[in-house]
Image (cartoon, rainbow, N blue to C red):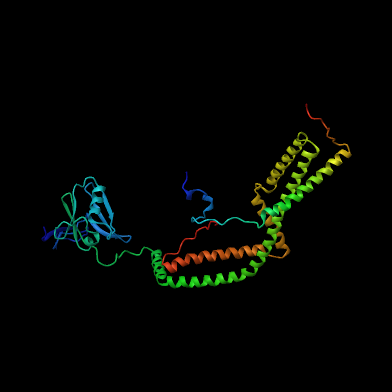
Amino acid sequence: MFGSRLFLCRLAFQNKRIPTPGPVWRVSWFSSQPPSKDVSVRYSLGRPVLALRLPSGCQGRFTLTPMLTTVGDLLRNITAKDPEVHTAALLNADGQRISSCTFMETVLNKDFQLVINETTHSVQALGQGSSHEHVLDVEDMKYLVQLLHSALRLPQQLHEQHSELLLRQEQLRRQLQPLETVRVKLAQEAESKAAMLGWAGLAYLSLQGGFLGYLTWYVFAWDIMEPVTFFISCTTSMIFFAYYILTRQDFILTKVSDRHFLHYFYQKATRHNFDVQKYNELKDDLAKVDADLRRLRSAIQLQLPVDQIRPESAA
Amino acid sequence: QLPPAATHMNCCCFYGGLCDTGDQTPFGLFRIALVVVPFLYVGTQISKSFAALLEEHDIFVPEDDDDDD
């Protein structure tokens, strides 16, 4: 199967006005099978690609992941791509058939032969070194430099950021502390005022109950009082609806109480010159710093990549 | 019949722990009674004077109808 093979090629000279003795024949010898023009393995975008002229005439390109693709996978892909391929096999340089479970990594290190429908193509191996692909443009260079930079700098950078964030957290907490005490005091006062409104409501309802009850049982009869009570209920529902119209909120007692609390709180805040906006900003910043620290914690302690920013849902 | 853990689902926190109990006002019922009873009494007094006012100015006098036979 091997042996020297005469390879004749004819060089045709251009039509010049130099008298030539005729076509010049050039003879070259190959000691093994010449590399077939139909099949070649080349690097493309970092992966070896097998380019193959299939029996049906089209050009097939099969990208190989050397450590994952097996010979069986490749042969399956070839037969799947072209229905005219009946038999496909991979032989090594000595002509022995390579088993299907061999990874392409071992195959590509040496010359091999690809047999398709009884036609044998011999393929030259790729070099052991890197792919020698041309760096396409500056972007690839930048990417490589960035990879190197992060690999070398990353742990130190994380620690630096961690200490920076701790400093910032400390600073914010120190700023917040006096504001926090004032806020707690104001909140207590506003809360007691809002609670007082609730008791006042209870007092009014019991007053109304006593009023109507006395009139019903001791002064007039129910037949006289019934319309009165009905119209009082009517008025109450009008009041609830008017509440909705004015505040665009449903009359739910917890929400009403919260609303009053906020109203009184803001009143007291203006009186005591407590800047609510600044307090809110500080609180937001502190929350962000805490979130960043939490994300860094997993990166530093557990050697995981830094978490993505997640919109925190209210607890 | 749901299993015991499935009833009262609102009492469980996000991770399955139990929620805190709500606000408890100390001496709650006593304080309510302390507010309701006096104001109830005040209401009756107001209605008494209101009825007297109506009768005095002759706006509305209830007729004393006898029991039906």
Q: Is residue A126 above or below residue A211?
A: below
Left or right of residue B25: residue A308? left
Q: Furthest-right residue in view?
A: B57
Q: In this view, does A87 lie above or below A175?
A: above
Q: How many numbered callouts?
A: 0
Q: In this view, does A58 lie above or below A219?
A: below
Query: Image quarter for residue A300?
Result: bottom left
* Image quarter in which the C terminus of chain B is found: top right
Query: Image quarter for residue A114?
Result: bottom left
Left or right of residue A253: residue A288? left
Foreground of the two, B10 or B49: B49
Left or right of residue A102: residue B63? right
| Residue A130 in the image, given as x and y percentages of width and height | 29, 66
Foreground of the two, A201 or A274: A201
| Residue A112 in the image, given as x and y percentages of width and height | 19, 59
Look at 32% across and 61% down and name the residue there.
A46
| Residue A310 in the image, given as x and y percentages of width and height | 50, 58
Look at 71% across and 42% down and name the residue there.
A238
Q: In this view, does A105 lie above or below B61?
A: below
Can I make out residue A146 in this image? yes
Foreground of the two, A245 or B5: B5
Q: Furthest-front residue in view?
A: B69
Can I make out residue A22 in this image? no
Look at 47% across and 45% down and name the residue there.
B2
| Residue A219 in the image, given as x and y percentages of width and height | 81, 38
Look at 40% across and 72% down and name the residue there.
A152
Query: Image quarter for residue A220?
Result: top right
